[in-house]
């Protein structure tokens, strides 16, 4: 059905965005975001993140996880491994149908070796992250994290998952 | 689209491939209890996704002028009825053969602003809230709230 994360993303979107959160490890929380796994099958899953306003993650990576993110709502900016955030302020406006101008826009595939970070503006933000876990069964990229943590709640969530 | 009831809207959204079209205006709300995202809004109808943190309980509350229909998604979540009593779902905290929660897709209604509540245990919880706002344009049921707030953050939002 799919052999890489982009194929999985395209399949999930075309299949009517099936909602089948797993019984195990569906919800994860940090100091800046709550995440729900919307669908998991084998080594693939899609998580939805809803992020608090005026927050930012440190640079980090998810080794062994190939991922691609999709913009949903709010004021979000992603940084690549050069630590520079893309300036998306010009796109903070609605389309004619009332949705955000960036809805559905993707961020390039990260193969798990590159650092990245997230910055959230005053309205909060939400995005999907499609994941292919190449080395083990999926849990959440929140707990499979290399780099400085977001805060104490994040540390607690990682500890609880071990 | 011409939906007459919250159930018609809910059934349409599910059959239409669960369209994701959060509005530019006010899609996200954060309280002491939940992070919410409006997944789709059209006229007086919308569906919000609620993710509840572990070990959190809402006070009994109502959303006047709103017909709500909830769909269970994940976690160890329980809904309270209009009397304030929670439905004991502890015997249903197990997976289906496909790995999903046994309660996935189960529905419960709070029509015409009926009192209700929600709580989650150690795994947190998530549900969809389908809403028909009969008297005004939708924003979030987190704002259209009668009852004690979830906590200090929620109280601050309600005061604005």
Image (cartoon, helix red, strand yellow):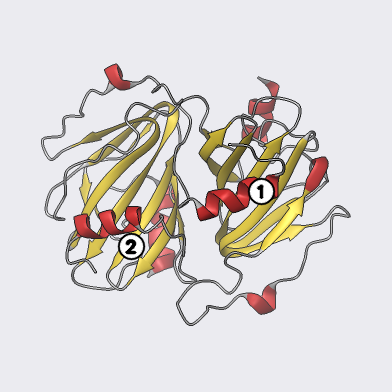
Q: Where is residue B16 in the image (x, y as percent from the top left)?
A: 49, 50
Q: Nearer the viewer, residue B134 or A117?
A: B134
**Which residue is at the far right?**
B83
Q: Where is residue A60 in the image (x, y as percent from the top left)?
A: 22, 47
**Letter of the chain that mark 2 sits on in the rendering:** A
Whether residue A107 is visible to the viewer of this picture, yes or no, is yes
Quadrant in the rendering for residue A156: bottom left
The residue shown at (31%, 50%) is: A129
Q: Residues within 10 Å of mark 2 (few under 14, many from 20)?
A: many
Check disc 2 and report the residue beneath it. A45
Q: Which dot marks residue B146?
A: none
Whether labels 1 and 2 belong to a single chain: the reply is no
Q: What element carries label 1?
A: helix
Whether residue A145 is visible to the viewer of this picture, yes or no, is no
Q: Is mark 2 on a helix, strand or loop?
A: strand
Quadrant in the rendering for residue B45: top right
Q: Residues within 10 Å of mark 1 (few under 14, many from 20)?
A: few
The residue shown at (22%, 54%) is: A67
Q: Where is residue A88 in the image (x, y as percent from the top left)?
A: 26, 23
Q: Where is A113 relative to B29, above or below?
A: below
Q: Is residue B138 left or right of residue A40?
A: right
Q: Where is A159 relative to B40, above or below?
A: below
Placement of the N terminus of chain B among the 4 image quadrants? top right
Q: Which dot marks residue B8?
A: 1
Placement of the C terminus of chain B among the 4 image quadrants? top right
The residue shown at (11%, 54%) is: A113
Alpha-carbon distance for marks 1 and 2?
A: 30 Å
**Letter of the chain that mark 1 sits on in the rendering:** B
Q: Nearer the viewer, residue B79 or A2?
A: A2
Q: Is residue B96 left or right of residue B60?
A: left
**Which residue is at the far bottom?**
B97
Q: Where is residue B72 in the image (x, y as percent from the top left)?
A: 61, 60
């Amino acid at each position: 059905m799919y052999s890489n994360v982009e194929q999985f993303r395209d399949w999930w979107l075309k299949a009517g965005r099936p909602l089948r959160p797993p019984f195990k490890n569906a919800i994860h929380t940090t100091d800046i975001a709550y995440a729900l796994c919307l669908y998991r099958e084998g080594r693939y899953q899609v998580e939805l993140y809803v992020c608090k306003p005026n927050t930012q993650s440190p640079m980090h990576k998810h080794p062994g996880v190939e991922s691609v993110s999709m913009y949903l709502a709010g004021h979000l900016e992603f940084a690549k491994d050069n630590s520079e955030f893309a300036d998306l302020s010009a796109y903070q406006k609605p389309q004619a149908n009332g949705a955000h101008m960036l809805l559905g826009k993707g961020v390039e595939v990260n193969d798990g070796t590159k650092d990245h970070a997230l910055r959230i503006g005053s309205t909060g933000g939400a995005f999907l992250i499609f994941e292919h876990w190449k080395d083990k069964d999926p849990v959440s990229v929140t707990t499979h994290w290399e780099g400085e943590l977001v805060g104490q709640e994040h540390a607690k969530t990682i500890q609880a998952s071990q | 689209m011409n939906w007459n009831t919250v159930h018609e809207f809910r059934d349409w959204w599910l059959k239409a491939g669960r369209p994701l079209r959060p509005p530019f205006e006010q899609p996200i709300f954060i309280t002491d209890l939940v992070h919410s995202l409006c997944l789709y809004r059209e006229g007086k109808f919308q569906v919000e996704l609620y993710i509840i943190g572990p070990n959190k309980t809402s006070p009994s509350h109502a959303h006047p002028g709103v017909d709500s229909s909830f769909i269970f998604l994940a976690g160890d979540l329980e809904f309270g009825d209009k009397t304030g009593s929670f439905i004991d779902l502890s015997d249903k905290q197990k997976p289906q053969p496909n790995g999903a929660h046994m309660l996935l897709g189960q529905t419960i209604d709070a029509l015409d602003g009926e009192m209700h509540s929600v709580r989650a245990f150690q795994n947190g919880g998530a549900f969809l809230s389908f809403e028909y706002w009969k008297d005004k344009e939708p924003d979030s049921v987190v704002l259209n709230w009668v009852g004690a707030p979830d906590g200090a953050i929620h109280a601050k939002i309600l005061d604005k």
